[in-house]
Amino acid sequence: MDSRRRRSPTINIGRYLSVSSLRRYENSDDSFVKPTNTKIYAFWTLVGLLCLLALANMILTIVIFSVLRLGQGMESMELLPDEGLVKFFGDSNFGKVSKSDGNIEGFAGSETEIKGVKGPVILEVEDAKGRQRNTLTLEQNGTQFKSINSFKVGDVFSTDNPVFKLSKSSVIRNVQSRVITTNKITAPQDEKLVLRSDTLIKIKGSEGTKIDGKEIIWTADQEVKLKSMNGSIVLSGKSGVVVDLKKIPIVGTTGLGGPITPQYKVCVCMPQGKLFKVPVSTDYNSQVACHNIDTSTNYNPCM
């Protein structure tokens, strides 16, 4: 009994010490876990911000590519690295353009125009050290050359008078003018003579107009008019004269009897000069004439 009583305090003290040490360990462990959770939250917050920045950067890049139309160049520019060229489409505005080889070329079949808006156009030639050697300045009030030993100007025609004359031996490939006065226009042999206008072409002769050619073709978006003031209009061809009748209106005749054949008679309104056609009947007793047409308001071709 004495031994048991003596051992019991020892056991109680051991339990107390073990429980106390456990509590101290838990308290110290709690103080160690709290800063670890804070750092984890900060880490994931930083990752989220980086993801948002990456997404915003991607959206901004897509917008820039779509607005500027970036690809193998831009909307009005194309890069050709294999050829060492840069192609510009449409109008391009530059303050200064430097070319090492001095070549500025355009597309085949189109003009290359260099224009200075409210300012001069200056062409400069520099040496290997970047110093200016030759300069050509084009201004509204004159043209100026600098550092040029000599140049030659050929007198083609006078710029004081817009009317200029050419010799008989002169050959011109293209002429652009509002009014051309001449007694004859001839194309070289086996080549076409083309007269083209975006609005109106008017050929007028004081004593008549004569057009000869292997083949003469007149086309217009709206109307082709032939008019003679004092004489007559003669259309003659070795193989005949062909008129496209697809767009010429068909006018019904009055008193037309018998079945109708796919044949038409071409008539002319005077003095308007408009063409129309009337169907021809197989009944030879019926009257088929240009004056036997329906002249009502809805069908009159001369109105």
Image (cartoon, rainbow, N blue to C red):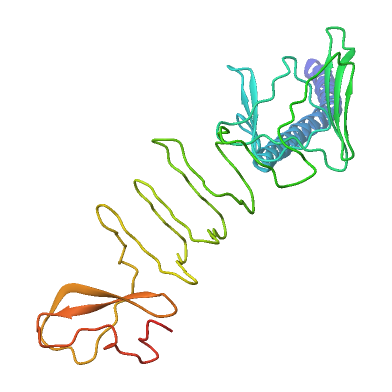
Image quadrant holding the N terminus, namely: top right
Image quadrant holding the C terminus, namely: bottom left
Q: Is residue 89 left or right of residue 31?
A: left
Residue 81: horizontal and vertical position, in percent?
61, 19
Q: Name the residue: 41% across, 69% down.
A: 232
Residue 1 lies, with reference to residue 183, above or below; the image says: above
Instruction: Tell which of 201 and 205 is nearer to you.
Output: 205
Residue 247: horizontal and vertical position, in percent?
34, 68
To which quarter of the image does residue 260 belong?
Answer: bottom left
To which quarter of the image does residue 34 belong?
Answer: top right
Residue 264: horizontal and vertical position, in percent?
22, 74
Q: Is residue 231 left or right of residue 139?
A: left
To which quarter of the image does residue 278 belong?
Answer: bottom left
In the rendered image, the residue lying farthest to the top is 128
Q: Name the residue: 87% across, 7% down.
A: 129
Q: In this orientation, does residue 46 appear?
A: yes
Instruction: Tell which of 289 and 66 is nearer to you.
Output: 289
Q: Is residue 297 left or right of residue 291?
A: right
Residue 29: horizontal and vertical position, in percent?
82, 25
Q: Is residue 263 left or right of residue 187?
A: left
Q: Name the residue: 34% across, 45% down.
A: 214
Residue 143 lies, with reference to residue 276, above or below; the image says: above
Residue 150 lies, with reference to residue 158, above or below; the image says: above
